[in-house]
Amino acid sequence: MFTKKYPVTSAIILLHLITGVTRAQVNTMSVAASEKDNSVEAEMASFQIADGYKIELYASEQLGIADPCAMRWDEKGRLWVLTIPSYPQLIPGTKPNDKLMILEDRDQDGKADFSSVFAEGLHMPLGFELGHGGVYLGEQTELLFLKDTNGDGKADTRDVLLTGFGTNDSHQTINSFVWSPGGELFFSQGHSIYSRVETPWGIEKADRAGIWRYRPLQRRLDGFLDGSMASVNPWGMNFGDWGQMFHKANDPELFYTVPGMIKSSHRALLPPIGKLVIKGSIIEIIRTKHLPDDLQGDFVVAGYYNNKVERMRVTKDSSGYISQLLEPLLNSTSRSFRPIDIKVGPDGALYVLDWYNPIIGHYQASMRHPDRDKTHGRIWRITANNRKLLTPPDLARTRVADLPEYLKSDEHWVRYQVKRLLAQSPVDEVKTAMSNWVAKLHPGDPGYEHHIMEAIGVYESHEIVNEKLLKILAAGSDPGARSYAAHAAGRWADRLPDPLQMLIPLINDTDPGVRLEALVAVANMRTPLAIVTAAQVLDHPVDKFIKYALEKAIHALEPYWSPALQTGNITFNKPSHLAYMVAVSPPDGYTAAQFRSLAQTENISADTKRSLLLNLARKGTPEDITFVINHPFSESDALLFESLGKTKPRLLPEKSVSRLKQILQSPGQDHVKIQIIRLVKAWNIKAMVPTLQEFAAGNTVSEKIQGESLQAVVELGGKASLVLLKKILDNPESSKSMKMASLKSLSLLDIQTAARATLKEVIQTSDPASLRDMISPVIDQKGGIPAFTNLLKNADLSADRSRQVIEILDLKGIDAPELKRQLKRMSGNGALTTRAYSPDYVEKLNAAITERGDAKKGAALYYANPSCASCHTIQGKGGNIGPDLSAIGKGLSPREIITELLWPNQNVKEGYNRIMVETKKGGLIQGIKLFENADMISVSTTDSKKPVIIDKKEIAVKTESGSIMPGGLADGYSEEEVRDLIKFLSGLGN
């Protein structure tokens, strides 16, 4: 039994609840327990459908669709379904036999009644699309083309179109295929995938998550947004009525993809336009008369994680979009309901592909866990009450000459199928059919511009340039028309006589969305003059989407414009354009004189000016640094001084030092002064020590400046500063902030003295809220924990204060066993030890949670400690250091939460190991490693809202071991509290 002796900070506990992975135990690693009743009827009873809708079964495992992962409609109204019972790992000694099935509703009663196998013997393919008389299928390393050449309904040819796609993770291989309006095949890959694909155009590579675009007739493959720049696992793309591209992460986020459709290795995260509460995938945009008006244009998303069909409303936001999460269309209480694909069908109904599996987790359960369902799979059909279902045209029997007329259909399903059919039809027949159809279109028709856009898409699919139609669309009245014209001009740039001239009016369009599309088009034209055109977008308001695309464009085109700029072969329309380009990507060989000249350009943004001045300081002479420091812009720009402090230290002329003193001695602007003082420390400007000593010792400046000055004096003056520090600490009149600063400074000079001074303050302080700031300098410094531990042996620390210090250690994620033993002894809790793992005890506590757990008390326990919400989000509120807890009850069972809470180090999920870095200056940094390359490590800590960036040159020792959650945290909770907390958490998301 637990005995409550001291409170435990919940933040670190909860961090591990979602992220830890224990060793195999009975039923522990299932995301959910298997349903007692797996029948269709039982699952149907679990649904709560939105008012005005009805849900029915369309197909089940009875037709052979166990473990379905993707579906697509054909022009005959047949539903093709990909099944992968071999997922997530083939059993050794067995042969793969995943299948591509075809379902038919032959009696037209709304339920599939016939199935056939088009292809079998497949090995874990995750996506496919119909086209060109066959099937494009992503199977592990290969993009395949399967075709039935003899009409027996089975694939008899298998062509490998491309190979070299990565397979590091079986749930992140190439997936979610879809045709663009212009006949390009898009698909994606996930975070653990590294691809090297040989094509007729050269080797294409993508490291980690990214999006692929394939142009079949050219056999051309292009990759975008790799490096996980637009989610770690993009899964599901779709296009708006004017070709606007969107994609869904397999996480909460939704993205407007267009700003990222520039080939560039420059790493910058694409901003999302909204998100779900918890994970979901796939986008289906509602565009059918069968469904109600209030649903039209909404995005429907497969909420596989929380067993929902989600609904999002996407609206214009300057050049991009923003989304709003609405009430779900469908909820289920069955944790085996796993929607992973959604499609509007030929009748206008919404079809939901149900993986039906209690385990959706990939890392969270054994690859061969017995509860992984291999026998079930369903497709559900959602219809609107009192609204007539549609009868689709017989496209399969329609002549090529008559197909274009269906491009006028209000039904997106019809237009999608027609364009797919036209893309695979003989080119001469298509050219004649399209020419005749376009000739009959009337400019006065309200849909005229959209018809022209659809026609251009057909021509694109055959790689035929139609400049006449492009000019009509570029002059269209609808911004969507002009946007698509910009897109098409970019695609045809290598075959148009002067594509840049055509795009200049569009990059200066009155509509920001048109300007964005034009910018993306220009950015993919590999010519020096492209950057001159791209820069014109700066003559108009720049939002986050345009800024993102422009910076990618600058980096993508830099190999072309930079040499041309140096040789004088290009000239920008305005000096401010040139200034922006150089600020974003300084050309090699650019001189200090050139940076100085550009920094004096009028009408440039603060970001641009700061970048130019910073580059001048890096490249220039001491006189140039004086110019930077004396520039009127600098005296009020804290970011400039912060950035200078991160550059290589320079020797400052006297007039530069005088200018820094002048700014420091002027009134106000503490935020600037703090960065100047930090610059002085970083550059070791000893001439500033007397001024800083005055600030540290006197009352002429704010406490913030006094504290910063004190730390600088210590770092610059060394042991000579000890007298000043002790004077401050011994003075009862010294402010709390000055004492904190003194402790921090003292810990750099003499850790033993600092530990004694810290312990004295810990004992005497009447402000428990200040304890964390008080003890952090010592315990975050090399030798601090042993020194503090040793002093405790003879210290008179109260039980309450001991418990408070333990809580701080837990919150900081510090695993210091001997120090904690000393503190527990002083708290009266020294005999308490963490019990060994016991499956029987887990079951006992789980039963108590079920029988007597009180979620309200657990919620009170959670919310009573503000540090919980500072780290974790619930329903959109809280911090983002730890995982989102909004649906933890969906992801982990009570048994799992018990195990993670009581035995966090049983096993640790990759990515959540504790990293401890000791710097050469003696600092200790503990947390979770976010990123590492050859030069630096980025660490997330509980002490800083921003990641801590550590230069590898400054690292003395680095260790990675165990969980970020220290062991023994639950020693402070009673068993009843553990029971109630887990009851609360296990209900989240249910």
Image (cartoon, helix red, strand yellow):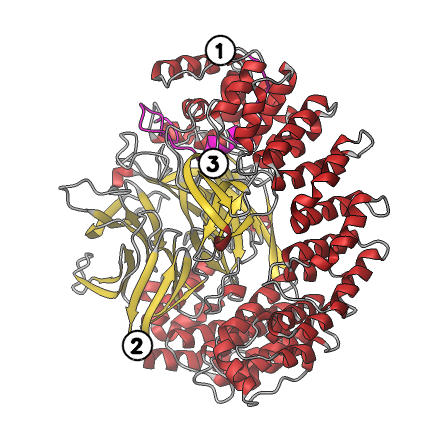
Q: Would residue 223 appear left or right of 286 to someone viewing this image?
A: left
Circle 2 SS class: loop
Which is nearer the eye, 713 or 527? 713
Residue designated by label 1:
831
**Number of other residues with Cα within 10 Å of mark 3, as a class: few under 14, some 14 to 19, many 20 or more:** many
Circle 3 SS class: loop
Cα gap from disc 1 to disc 2, whole angstroms: 84 Å
Residue 59 lies in quadrant? top left
**Number of other residues with Cα within 10 Å of mark 1, as a class: few under 14, some 14 to 19, many 20 or more:** few
Q: Does the magenta portion include 18? A: yes
Cα gap from disc 1 to disc 3, whole angstroms: 43 Å
Residue 297 horizontal/vertical position (percent): 56, 54
Task: Say whether marks 1 and 3 touch (CB < 8 Å).
Answer: no
Cα gap from disc 2 to disc 3, whole angstroms: 46 Å
Task: Reply above or below: 695 against 519.
Answer: above
Task: Reply above or below: 673 against 756.
Answer: below
Q: Would residue 896 appear left or right of 576 to someone viewing this image?
A: left
Residue designated by label 2:
426
The magenta segment: 4-33
Residue 700 horizontal/vertical position (percent): 86, 47
**Number of other residues with Cα within 10 Å of mark 2, as a class: few under 14, some 14 to 19, many 20 or more:** few
